[in-house]
Amino acid sequence: MKVVALAGGVGGAKLADGLSNLIEKGELTVIVNTGDDFTHFGLKICPDLDTICYTLAGIANPETGWGRSCESWKAMETISKLGGPDWFQLGDLDLGLHLERSRRIAQGATLSQVTRQICEAFAVEDNVLPMSDEEIPTHLFTNEGELSFQEYFVNRNCRPVVLDIQFIGREQTNPAPGVISSIQLADKVVFCPSNPWVSLDPILAVPGIREAVRQKKEVVAVSPIIGGKTVKGPAAKMYLDRRIEPSAFAVANHFKEIITGFVYDEVDFNLDEKIKGLGIETLKTSILMNTQKDRIRLATEVLNFTSV
Amino acid sequence: MKVVALAGGVGGAKLADGLSNLIEKGELTVIVNTGDDFTHFGLKICPDLDTICYTLAGIANPETGWGRSCESWKAMETISKLGGPDWFQLGDLDLGLHLERSRRIAQGATLSQVTRQICEAFAVEDNVLPMSDEEIPTHLFTNEGELSFQEYFVNRNCRPVVLDIQFIGREQTNPAPGVISSIQLADKVVFCPSNPWVSLDPILAVPGIREAVRQKKEVVAVSPIIGGKTVKGPAAKMYLDRRIEPSAFAVANHFKEIITGFVYDEVDFNLDEKIKGLGIETLKTSILMNTQKDRIRLATEVLNFTSV
């Protein structure tokens, strides 16, 4: 069974990890949001790609969900001492990856080439693809002005009210090699429980991806919202900022034109008819992934769920 | 007493540290070789400047003489894992400095401005100046072709035969602010026991510096060669490559036009007349600096030695 998963960071990585445990090697492709990527200290930082790779490699920090396990923070210690910008935490193990990726890109390698090399080095056998090899930065237009994603997310702690979101320059960009063909060949496309606004929408905004997904028979989204709240991140707040009640229904409605099935949590039992009313098949189950076992159980249910 | 010390890395740092312990705060200026500087992983690396700053700050690795004490190597661990270039060891604490320096320089700061900020952060109260804010890379023309200093020194372990040394682009460069005036105001100029060819010559090659030194009444060099051998580094081998017998005399002869005094080790007792024959005053003492006490004792002797 060939599966394509669209994913952002921590929540997306958990389901991708569950899927990776069930799907034959080479049959899972994870297409990852790169709208959060930014340049810091001259280094190319790809938060979601790294969270996915570290998680699939089994070397992610189990407490934060991002960054590496057994991490140290010596370089940041010096940066802070020198009065440099320390709002974005760069672990030492993690820094090695940013340094080597930036070096290779400066030498002319593409982001997807470097990502493949990283996966090989860390023995990740799934196909991890950036949504694009080109930069498509997500910008948030807020009551405090235009902010890049990291400024909003890390630096301002998601406090500003988000009025509009744009994926800068997206019209002139292309999906990374393999993105469209992997979707075309997939038996199932899965939207991981990632932020619809700033993790999945950026992927779907790359020219050609939304159209490729729309043509699939089976596209299943897993809700990132449980009981009106997100497990992590500002997805629920972003719905409120737009004056939309944050709920699993809001997410299903967000993607109603391209998904055929929707997986949401049993605490939201009262939403079933509403979601079905959008013409979407539903699967109500426990979707919170606290343990590795949860990841595999949810992935199993998502793979077994037929929404055709 | 105002003193200017010209220095390269480890050996230079030891004597500079001794001088720093004796000279009133603000009265010692250390002018440091930047010919070894290079860009690695997009970061500006200044090996000699960092060795001097770490040593004066009391945070240098006491075993290697370069790098920081209590250092860790997590970033390098990742770089090696990813198959990246790991021939130049970048410690995690050290990396933080390279990152922050490179960031500030990219923002438009000069190397001497950043060096001052680094010294302030590490509570170094001496004036540490790069020889120039401009890049003057030392290139070695060898039997294996033209090599940058780090390629020769670290990557090829000083094996190639050095036929010629050039300080690329030196004619168009300027000394860093404060370099010439500090020499002019100094009561004594000290050449630390650094490599004449690739640590001191690059400093003297910056337009204006050699002339400023030549006009001083008291210029004292400390031999980096003891009993025909260097304590560390390829200085002796470079004399051999040029078919010159490596010795304290060879060093005195190297600088005969600009020094007034020469300090060398008592094991070289037989060289006194030869060196005096160059018109240079001599001081014969123990110049090996194994301990902090040695540094201070040698610095005391150098300061008390009158070569006028």
Image (spheres, coloured by chain):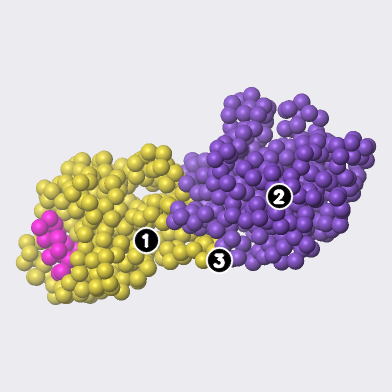
Chain colours: A purple, B yellow
Please tell me whether mark 3 sits on a helix, a strand or a loop: helix
Residue underneath mark 3: B81
Closer-to-camera residue (B188/A287): A287
Report crowding for label 1: few under 14, some 14 to 19, many 20 or more residues within 10 A (C-alpha): few
Q: Residue furthest top?
A: A143
Closer-to-camera residue (B251/A180): A180
Please tell me whether mark 2 sits on a helix, a strand or a loop: strand
Q: Amino acid at mark 2?
A: Leu
Image coords of residue A195 (percent x, y): 72, 41
Asked whether the residues under marks 3 and 1 belong to the same chain, the reply is: yes
Report crowding for label 2: few under 14, some 14 to 19, many 20 or more residues within 10 A (C-alpha): many
Which residues, given as a range, are shown in magenta? B249-263
Image coords of residue B263 (percent x, y): 19, 63
In three-dimensional space, the C-alpha distance between marks 3 and 1, rounded to whole angstroms, equals 38 Å
> Left or right: where does residue B258 sit relative to residue A59?
left
Q: Residue at x 86, y 39 (%)?
A: A279
In three-dimensional space, the C-alpha distance between marks 3 and 2, rounded to whole angstroms, equals 27 Å
Image coords of residue B252 (percent x, y): 15, 64
First in residue order: circle 3 vs circle 1: 3
Of the two numbered discs 3 and 1 in the rendering, the one whose residue sits closer to the viewer:
3
Q: Amino acid at mark 1?
A: Gln
In the rendered structure, find residue B292 and report the number of the disc placed on it.
1
Image coords of residue B245 (percent x, y): 16, 75
Q: Residue at x 21, y 59 (%)?
A: B166
Of the two numbered discs 3 and 2 in the rendering, the one whose residue sits closer to the viewer:
2
Q: Amino acid at mark 3?
A: Lys
Please tell me whether mark 1 sits on a helix, a strand or a loop: helix
